[in-house]
Amino acid sequence: MSGQKAFAVLLDPDKIEQNAFSALLAQTVTNQIDFFLVGGSLVTDYAHKEVISAIRRHSQTPIILFPGNPLHIEASADAILLLSLISGRNPEFLIGQHVIAAPLLKKSGLEILPTGYMVVDSGTQTTVSYISGTMPLPYDKPGVAACTAMAGEMLGLQLIYLDAGSGARRPVSPEMIAAVREAVDVPIVVGGGINSGEKAYEALKAGADVIVVGNGIEQDPDLLPQLSAVVREFNQSVVQA
Ligand SMILES: CC(C)=CCC/C(C)=C/CC/C(C)=C/CC/C(C)=C/COP(=O)(O)OP(=O)(O)O
Ligand SMILES: O=P(O)(O)OC[C@@H](O)CO
Ligand SMILES: [Mg+2]
């Protein structure tokens, strides 16, 4: 990672509607995005391969898998977030699924991005929380988030992902992002409920290195160019300062 802020678009293979998908891919030609994330907690169609090849026909942007379980490994992506759900206390999602996935991952040739995945309470239960049977981090406890991230970094995890959950009513607070920023040196990914330029800017200003947006773009196609501009302008203002 270059020290510059980045913008990732999350595509859920189950939710892709062909016309909207083509329009989104066309937008990414003129509005820079830095990564595609492909994944979901529960994927019923297993269309990862098709989604990835459709992206590749239009774009050279790196494609990173965001898996809910080992069935979501697809070797035609560029990399995979190897999530360990460190906000939870379910051994299956801390290490169990990884033992099952390890030989498949080795064979896949994918770049492995070991990630401390922290799900943060946003007022309603998220799919991740339900599927993993774990409690999210309390919304208003930045100190707990900071210690969790610190432990993840000490264990060797190379990214911290703070996620308020898909379609969250409120994103992770700037206070929590700032506390985690203070606590670790690794890049911080922030997602869940970022559905406006202002929320994206707040997350970047608080210390997020990568913002991830899924639902917001599905619901409002004009958001992609807006967010791309917010991230570019943020990076330019840092260079000029
Ligand atoms: C070891 C491997 C390869 C996989 C296991 C990976 C782990 C531990 C995952 C943690 C728990 C989990 C279920 C994560 C899913 C994260 C994700 C892709 C969230 C995207 O949002 P959705 O949960 O799909 O939301 P919707 O219900 O709105 O679609
Ligand atoms: O769909 P949204 O709310 O943008 O969330 C993205 C991602 O962080 C969910 O895991
Ligand atoms: Mg999903």
Image: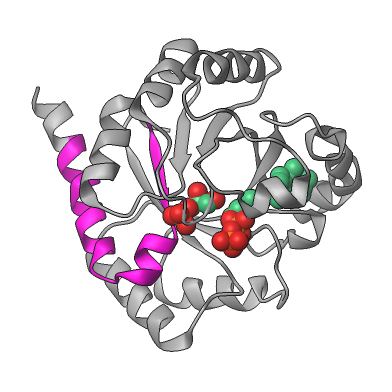
Q: Quadrant of residue 219?
A: bottom left
Is 44 placed above or below 105 here?
Answer: below
- What residue is drawn where x is 43% and y is 35%? 172
State which quarter of the image contains the N terminus. Answer: top left
Q: Is residue 90 left or right of residue 16?
A: right
Is 86 placed above or below 149 here?
Answer: below
Q: Which residues are magenta?
A: 208-235
* Residue positioned most to the front: 123
| x, y percent for residue 204 | 30, 34
| x, y percent for residue 228 | 25, 54
Q: Quadrant of residue 32?
A: bottom left
| x, y percent for residue 56 | 49, 71
Residue 227 in view (yes/no): yes
Q: Quadrant of residue 231?
A: top left
Asked whether 217 falls inside the magenta stretch, the response is yes
- What residue is drawn where x is 50% and y is 22%? 186
- What residue is drawn where x is 46% and y is 24%? 140
* Residue positioned most to the bottom: 19
Is 57 placed above or below 67 here?
Answer: below
Asked whether 100 falls inside the magenta stretch, the response is no
| x, y percent for residue 225 | 22, 62
Residue 110 in view (yes/no): no
What scheme was used to colour the molecule? Answer: one colour
Magenta span: predominant SS is helix
